[in-house]
Image: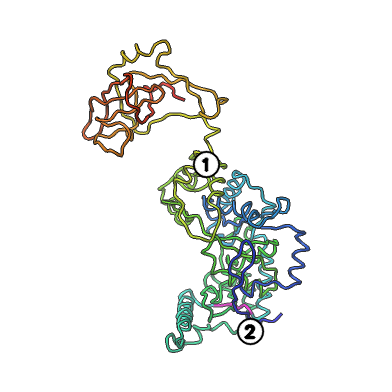
Amino acid sequence: MTTEQPTATITTSNALAAREIEWAKNTPELLSEHATINHGIIRTRFPPEPNGYLHVGHAKSMNMNFRLAFEKLGVPVEQRRTIFRYDDTNPDAESPEYIDSLRRDLEWLGWTPERTTYSSDNFQTLYELAVKLIKKGMAYVCDMTKAEMEAQRDLAKRRSAAVAVGKDPDAEAPIPSADILPGRNRDTTVERNLKMFKEMKLGLHDEGTMTLRLKMDFESANPNMYDLVAYRIRYTPHPHAGKGWCIYPNYDFTHGICDSLERIDYSICTLEFETRREPYYWILWALDMYRPKVYEMSRLNLEYTVLSKRRLLKLVEAYHVRGWDDPRMPTISGLRRRGYTKEIINKFCNDVGATRAMNVVQMDKLSQVARLTLADTTRRAMTVLEPIKVVIGNFAEVTAAAGEGGLTFDVQNSPTDASLGSHSVTLTETIYMDSDDFRLDEDPNFYRLTPGKPVGIKYHGGNLVCDKVIKNGKKVTELKCHLDISEGRKKTQIVHHLGPIGRSYL
């Protein structure tokens, strides 16, 4: 195979079409081998990093990888396979707690993977492939500091920007020294790089002193092609692989290779990874490995909701919440504790769908899905969050007018399913209504109780009329009212209520 690098040419493909490049093209031999191994199976993967708990954005990814992608592609159910992979290449951020939580949430949502894998199970293979790149002159050990790499990257970006607008890069961003660009280690010998990479593996160098980099393209318009770091030294035991390694592959080097090794057909990620497809395919091209199709979809942006594991971790570590499963958190565990069922979450993700268009989903959408999903299976209950005491002054008159049926009403636990049983609701002299159902000031757009506007009482049907407002400071604490039970009374908006504390309304 020639090492001459092909140019990035845009093409299109199938139902999950996205930007493709020359490196993405498989040879007929690779395609034939892949088809023989997969036997008509179409395979996706769900590869979260175990560096936090899964959130509702991951639920969208699961829905895409386990179901929606296959529907878009028209794949029969019997030919669908999805691998659950722990993308565990950063031992500093990972833990057994996170590993367990990912498995638990995936199982709770009802998804069944073909098998569960770990990127770390491929550490030896990844190391051998890195050695292969060194032997081909496509990778080298680099001793540049972090500051030097940043200066190198900045210089390459400025030179690329100059070329993009037709200017001379040597005039706009001159190279001060070959030690910076292309770098003092880039053209070192294969023998030197094999020796030093082995020394890195044996733990003979300190953290931060050496990296293995890929010899990519400093003239690319994509900064991710500026000699990507493939390996770093880290003296941290791995939560799954143990203490056998002190060099770890980075995400960009690992996940494409693991996709190929696991015979993935469609590698689906979110749009912020779109510029990563160049290094993804370059690595597989350089190793002459099968290249899966890559599709980037928009990430889930939920109104007023933080969906960044890094920021959620800050909330946990600063004790703003009581852990990752706090009901206020948008994690799967948090939503579960808040009362959301797997049916609600999966239906929500299904309704949101998966496209490449960026959007923000309103929180009301999730609430609406919850209401509709629970409507046919859940018992109803009345509650007030901020109660105002209401005393009905003409209660004796109301009781006398009630007749034989009295003021106790039989109410179905579900308005749509009588099999869920019923309960009784009794109207009493003192009731409690929610503060949101009352306003002191008149407002033509407010259709609940005000001093000048009556409101209907649920189940009874009489109109509650406010006669007097009792306040403690500025806060309304009690309403003196009467019930209008006259013939021909005006129909009004209906509000719910609760009886005295201790009376069951369930």
Write the residue at 48% across / 84% down. 163
Closer to us: 80 or 273: 80
Position of 383 compared to 240: left or right?
left
* Number of numbered discs overlaid on the protein picture: 2
For residue 82, which quarter of the picture? bottom right
Cα separation, mark 2 vs mark 1, equals 56 Å
Q: In this rendered view, identify the residue nearer to me: 363 or 210.
A: 363
Measured along the vertical axis of the image, is residue 384 above or below residue 365? above
Label 2 is placed on what type of residue?
Answer: Thr
> In the image, which residues are magenta?
138-142
Write down the quadrant of residue 83 in the picture: bottom right
Q: On screen, 78 above or below 176? A: above
Is 322 a magenta residue? no
Please name which of the two marks, 2 or 1, marks the residue nearer to the observer: 1
Disc number at residue 336?
Answer: 1
Q: Residues within 10 Å of mark 1 (few under 14, many from 20)?
A: some
Q: Looking at the picture, how far across and down is residue 72, in whole percent?
A: 63, 56
Residue under pointer 2: 189
Q: Secondary structure at mark 1?
A: helix
Sooner in the amino-acid sequence: mark 2 or mark 1: 2
Q: Secondary structure at mark 2?
A: loop
467 lies above or below 276: above
Q: Quadrant of the N terminus?
A: bottom right
